[in-house]
Amino acid sequence: MRSTQAIFIKQLRDIFKNRMVLIQFIVFPLIAFVFTEVVAKPNDSISNNMFVTIFAGIYAGMTILTTTAGMISEDRERKSMRFLVMAGVKPHQYMLGIGGVMMVMSLLVSVVFGFMGGFYGMDFVKFVAALMLGAIASVLLGAAIGIVSKNQQAATAMAMPLGMLLGFTPMLAMFNETVKKYASVFYTMQVDVLVNDFAASFMKSAFVILANAVVFAVLFTVAYKVKGLRG
């Protein structure tokens, strides 16, 4: 418990010390706000929350993934990972510390998106829950990428294009049925379903998201055991 708490506090401090990282949590809500006020609200043919749901999905699939990968690869680059493993820190303790920080930040951003989209009651709860499920999957995938990367540059080179693919695929699916059909196995597609259709089966989409998360968790655990001492 102490190991998890120490990692949590360390990473939280690092986020607020690094402005470039902190900006990543602000940029998509800010863009969504501008597009909503300038484009959506003046146009009766566009839903007021269209850009909120689009950029919330991109945030869950891209920002969380790349930030997590960057945080962990930084630990490896600075050799912090070596000392953590030698100190007996287990994969789940390390993951809980890193993931805890990302979940707190994701919850705050998700709530902002929810209020911005004008969601209330159970719709608000479902919206935030969908984004948090997506964030969990992104954290685990980002962790797997970060643990196998030699440094932050390598992690960014791997995480950024993958994050863009996952984050922007739901937007492409809006205009292409083929993409929509074959990309339905991606967790970001299921997040998009949930935040855009509150009548959709929450359990069905949640199952796909969590299945993605389980695969990513296994990848992280294996990578941690193989690469941890080399960090």
Image (spheres, grey):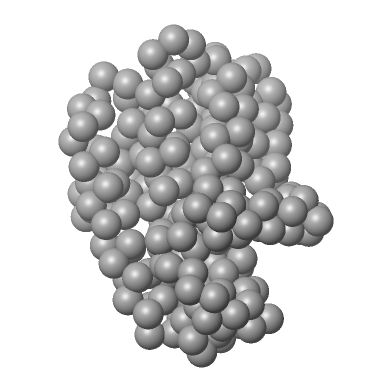
Q: Position of residue 85 (x, y in %)?
A: 50, 78
Q: Position of residue 178 (x, y in %)?
A: 23, 52
Q: Position of residue 54 (x, y in %)?
A: 49, 37
Compare residues 10 and 64 and report the one nearer the observer.
10
Compare residues 98 and 70 and report the one nearer the observer.
98
Horizontal arrangement in the rendering, residue 1 relative to residue 122 (left or right): right
- Which quarter of the picture shows residue 27? top right
Q: How many marks?
A: 0
Identify which residue is drawn at 50% across, 53% down.
1
Q: Is residue 179 visible?
A: no
Identify which residue is drawn at 57% across, 40% down.
104
- Give above or below for 9 relative to 141: above
Compare residues 155 and 163 and report the one nearer the observer.
155
Identify which residue is drawn at 60% across, 35% down.
109
Q: Position of residue 167 (x, y in %)?
A: 46, 52
Compare residues 36 and 201 and report the one nearer the observer.
201
- Give above or below for 112 relative to 20: above
- Check the picture and name the quadrant holding the C terminus: bottom right
Horizontal arrangement in the rendering, residue 18 relative to residue 95 (left or right): right
Identify which residue is drawn at 64% across, 83% down.
79
Residue at the limit of the structure toward the bottom, as seen here: 230
- Give above or below for 49 relative to 92: above
Horizontal arrangement in the rendering, residue 42 relative to residue 58 (left or right): right
Q: Is residue 57 visible?
A: yes
